[in-house]
């Protein structure tokens, strides 16, 4: 019995601020405006297909079997679209943790869509594949703007909501030598509640309205960081740990830092020389294994090989 196999990589993604756009019932057009960036810490996914009499999807995350509703929805939707029945083994090898705001579900969904799309339809465009990932994120309330950012790469402002090919992005210039230190932990209110609860929805959107416009009109790393901080404060999303971490980074001259949405997590832009200080500071508040040193990923998700 032959095995069909494909691999794809998708970067992690950090959101600094966002506005929810969910008035339409069509997931492709649902999404967020806002700003964020992709990082080289991400997810490499291997999809293996075997012939089967029934559809069977198994998902691993760093060699552990997991319940992965977003990845599974991507695979099921593609199977239905192409009228295919198979046994799929989807193996995510990832350097980003789940549930802390580093875009793990989006990276898994996008890399799965790209790899499985290559197997089912070699002519499928990247944007078409990414659409399946975006819709799975929206339906499962795990993200609104990660996939389009991970599709593009770099530092982005999402000026119009929706999946790749529908939503629109403009880039923020950055020094390609810049380093990124991330510290991420669980503890923020459930993302699903923050994205679906009416009161939080309104509070987030009120906080974001003018700030998204400010970033789009003055595209720089410093403006992005400043607006991200103002957004977290205005929306009431900052945690005590995040506030303490940012104060400590500021005191050390590492002020290009802000909260990661939506997590009890922070990001810090710094030079190579500054990474050690940033790691030392954040390791006082987060466990050492929760602190990651990475860089901005200029490229978006893509099939490997």
Image (cartoon, rainbow, N blue to C red):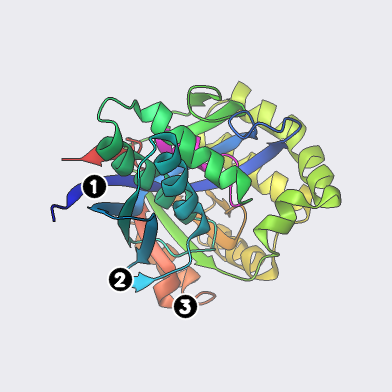
- Relative to residue 285, is residue 208 drawn left or right? right
Residue positioned most to the front: 53
Give me the C-alpha separation between circle 1 and circle 2: 16 Å
Location of mark 2 (residue): 63
Q: Nearer the viewer, residue 221 or 254?
A: 221
Q: Position of residue 216 (x, y in %)?
A: 60, 25
Work out whether 150 lies above or below 295: above
Residue 148 forms part of the magenta stretch: yes
The secondary structure that dominates the magenta segment is: helix
Q: SS of the residue at dot 2?
A: loop
- Relative to residue 89, is residue 107 drawn left or right? right
- Relative to residue 170, is residue 230 drawn left or right? right
Q: Nearer the viewer, residue 197 or 38?
A: 197
Q: Say if residue 294 shows up in the picture.
A: yes
Who comes first in sequence, dot 1 or dot 2?
1
Q: Position of residue 163 (x, y in %)?
A: 53, 30
Q: Position of residue 67 (x, y in %)?
A: 48, 67
Q: Residues within 10 Å of mark 1 (few under 14, many from 20)?
A: many
Location of mark 1 (residue): 7
Magenta stretch: give its range: 142-151
Location of mark 3 (residue): 287
Point 19% across, 48% down: residue: 4
Name the disc covering residue 115, or none: none
Work out whether 125 lies above or below 58: above
């Amino acid at each position: 019995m032959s095995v069909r196999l494909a691999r794809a990589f998708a970067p992690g993604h950090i959101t600094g601020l966002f506005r929810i756009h969910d008035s339409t019932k069509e997931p492709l057009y649902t999404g967020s405006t806002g700003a964020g960036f992709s990082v080289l810490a991400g997810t490499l996914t291997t999809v293996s297909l075997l012939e089967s009499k029934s559809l069977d999807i198994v998902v691993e995350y760093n060699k552990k079997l997991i319940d992965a509703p977003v990845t599974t929805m991507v695979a099921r939707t593609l199977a239905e679209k192409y009228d295919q029945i198979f046994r799929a083994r989807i193996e995510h090898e990832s350097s980003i943790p789940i549930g802390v705001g580093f875009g793990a579900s989006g990276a898994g969904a996008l890399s799965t869509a790209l790899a499985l799309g290559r197997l089912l339809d070699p002519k499928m465009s990247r944007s078409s594949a990414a659409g399946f990932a975006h819709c799975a994120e929206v339906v499962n309330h795990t993200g609104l703007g990660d996939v389009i950012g991970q599709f593009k790469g770099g530092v982005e402002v999402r000026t119009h909501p929706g999946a790749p090919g529908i939503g629109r992005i403009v880039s923020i210039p950055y020094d390609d030598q810049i380093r990124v230190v991330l510290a991420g932990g669980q503890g923020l209110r459930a993302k699903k509640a923050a994205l679906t609860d009416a009161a939080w929805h309104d509070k987030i959107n009120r906080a974001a309205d003018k700030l998204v416009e400010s970033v789009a009109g003055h595209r720089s790393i410093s403006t992005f960081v400043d607006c991200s901080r103002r957004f977290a404060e205005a929306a009431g999303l900052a945690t005590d740990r995040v506030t303490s971490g940012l104060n400590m980074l500021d005191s050390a001259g590492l002020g290009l830092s802000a909260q990661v949405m939506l997590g009890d997590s922070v990001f810090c832009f710094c030079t190579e020389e500054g990474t050690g200080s940033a790691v030392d500071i954040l390791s006082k508040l987060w466990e050492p294994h929760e602190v990651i040193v990475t860089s901005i990923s200029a490229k978006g998700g893509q099939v490997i090989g």
